[in-house]
Image (spheres, rainbow, N blue to C red):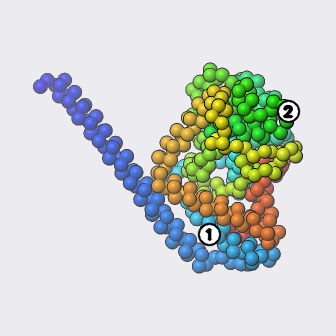
């Protein structure tokens, strides 16, 4: 056997060994993540037992916190919040505080915006203060520069404002100048669900003889409105966006998988699950009676299984660019869950859902004291409300309860 043959054989053996070691490493990592989740669960349960014996102090509630609902529900919230606060990841980054949030329309983006607002308030970060609800890309408020977080829509009323893909390029530059070295995050939604929600919120309330979902889908109106939040109009636009910008986004959340998305966001940013807690804001799938910002009534949005097949088919045709973004985000979310560990993510999702349930039940009490009511109102602010609660210097108003 020649020296060249021997060298070639060695390279083949090394390659085979590398593949085998990689497989073993991957398997060991998976087992370690599952064990980590089990150990974390046991550790948290033990910590909670210790805290429960020493806490639940009624003097940490206001004197007006009623014994019928406020007091017992506050005990449940205390335990859930404490557990959520304890959930952290072993190899997380240092907590990241520079966030360029691309707020989208009809995606539960106000819920995510409120989470970022509260995180900024708790950690004394600078939240960009815009003089308008939609950002002005020709203006940067010097009183809040450099900013740590931006929570406003950049697109505003996208039908009136967004004209071409060049608008997104301008917006990207604006964000990187206002928030130095940011992590970009955004939230997307399953395209057909997004289209119907957008239509029933923005267009159906206008009325009119031919103003119905089936007709709009057939005529191709509101084409790719989810992609429009990134000024994407054409196949060329979306290809350039995917080649140039999509990797700038550290986290892509999905509103139809909100709890999983928030767990991944907490992991990506090095924040606790308590930072991800929220109460439900406007839901256009809810029962009749909701109104828009202008007082016009909103009809409940039909769900996908309630739509005629022809309407669904037409909607798929006019949301193809939306689907490119959504499918990428879904694949990225799935990959992140595998990286964190599916067992741990399931555990964290349960803890987050329990926290949100405890928070909602507490805030639904009719016998809250003044401080408890103020805290719940702070948690329940919509986008226009939390934008108003950013001070001139960029400090977000903070509300706290002593037991949390």
Number of the label disc, if any, that sits on residue 139:
none
The secondary element bearing badge 2 is classed as: loop
The answer to whether mark 1 and mark 2 are in CB contact below 8 A is no
Which residue corresponds to mark 2?
Answer: 208
Label 1 SS: helix
Left or right: 241, with 301 as reference point: left
Query: Quick one: 279 or 195, which is closer to the camera?
Result: 195
Q: Is residue 260 above or below residue 217?
A: below
Q: CA distance from mark 1 to mark 2?
A: 51 Å
Which numbered disc flags the more N-terminal residue, 1 or 2? 1
Tell me: 310 left or right of 345: right
At 29% from the left and 41% from the top, the residue drawn is 20
Q: Position of residue 24 (x, y in %)?
A: 32, 47
Q: Does residue 222 appear anywhere in the picture?
A: no
Q: Nearer the viewer, residue 28 or 144?
A: 28
Identify the residue at horizontal 54%, vertical 71% (top origin).
47
Q: Residue 62 sits in which quadrant?
A: bottom right
Using the rendered image of the protein, determine whether residue 34 is visible from the camera's viewpoint. Answer: yes
- Compared with 217, 338 (above or below) is below
Q: Around disc 2, counting alpha carbons within 10 Å, would you say few (fewer than 14), some (14 to 19), or many (20 or more)?
A: few
Q: Position of residue 386 (x, y in %)?
A: 79, 50
User: Where is residue 311 drawn, in percent x and y?
Assistant: 67, 32
The percent position of residue 23, horizontal first and vertical second, equals 33, 43
Mark 1 crowdedness (10 Å alpha carbons): few <14, some 14-19, many ≥20: many
At horizontal 81% and vertical 30% (from top left) the residue drawn is 210
Residue that mark 1 sits on: 79
Query: Which quadrant holds the N terminus?
Result: top left
The C terminus is located in which quarter? bottom right
Residue located at (69% from left, 48% from top): 112
């Amino acid at each position: 056997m020649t020296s060249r043959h021997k060298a070639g054989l060695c390279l083949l053996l090394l390659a085979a060994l590398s593949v085998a070691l990689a497989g073993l490493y991957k398997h060991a990592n998976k087992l370690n993540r599952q064990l980590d989740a089990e150990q974390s669960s046991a550790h948290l349960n033990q910590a909670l037992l210790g805290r429960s014996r020493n806490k639940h102090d009624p003097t940490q509630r206001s004197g007006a916190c009623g014994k019928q609902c406020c007091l017992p529900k506050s005990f449940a919230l205390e335990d859930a919040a404490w557990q959520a606060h304890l959930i952290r990841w072993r190899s997380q980054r240092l907590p990241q505080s520079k966030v360029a949030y691309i707020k989208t329309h009809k995606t539960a983006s106000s819920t995510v915006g409120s989470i970022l607002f509260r995180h900024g308030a708790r950690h004394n970060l600078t939240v960009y203060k815009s003089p308008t609800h939609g950002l002005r890309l020709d203006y940067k408020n010097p009183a809040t520069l450099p900013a740590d977080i931006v929570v406003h829509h950049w697109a505003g009323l996208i039908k009136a404002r967004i004209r071409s893909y060049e608008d997104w390029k301008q917006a990207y530059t604006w964000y990187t100048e206002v928030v130095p070295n940011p992590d970009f995050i955004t939230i997307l939604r399953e395209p057909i669900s997004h289209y119907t929600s957008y239509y029933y919120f923005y267009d159906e309330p206008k009325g009119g003889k031919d103003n119905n979902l089936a007709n709009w889908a057939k005529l191709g109106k509101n084409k790719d409105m989810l992609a429009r939040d990134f000024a994407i109009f054409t196949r060329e636009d979306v290809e350039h966006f995917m080649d140039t910008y999509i990797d700038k986004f550290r986290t892509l959340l999905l509103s139809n998988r909100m709890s999983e998305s928030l767990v991944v966001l907490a992991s990506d940013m090095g924040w606790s699950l308590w930072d991800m807690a929220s109460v439900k804001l406007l839901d256009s799938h809810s029962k009749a009676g909701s109104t828009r910002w202008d007082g016009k009534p909103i009809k409940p949005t039909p769900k996908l299984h309630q739509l005629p097949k022809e309407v669904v088919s037409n909607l798929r045709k006019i949301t193809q660019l939306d689907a490119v973004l959504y499918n990428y985000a879904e694949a990225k979310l799935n990959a992140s869950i595998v990286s964190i560990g599916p067992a741990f993510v399931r555990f964290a999702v349960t803890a987050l859902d329990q926290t949100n349930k405890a928070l909602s039940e507490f805030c639904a009490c009719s016998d809250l004291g003044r401080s408890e009511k103020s805290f719940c109102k702070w948690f329940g602010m919509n986008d226009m409300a939390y934008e108003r609660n950013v001070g001139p210097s960029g400090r977000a108003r903070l509300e706290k309860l002593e037991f949390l």
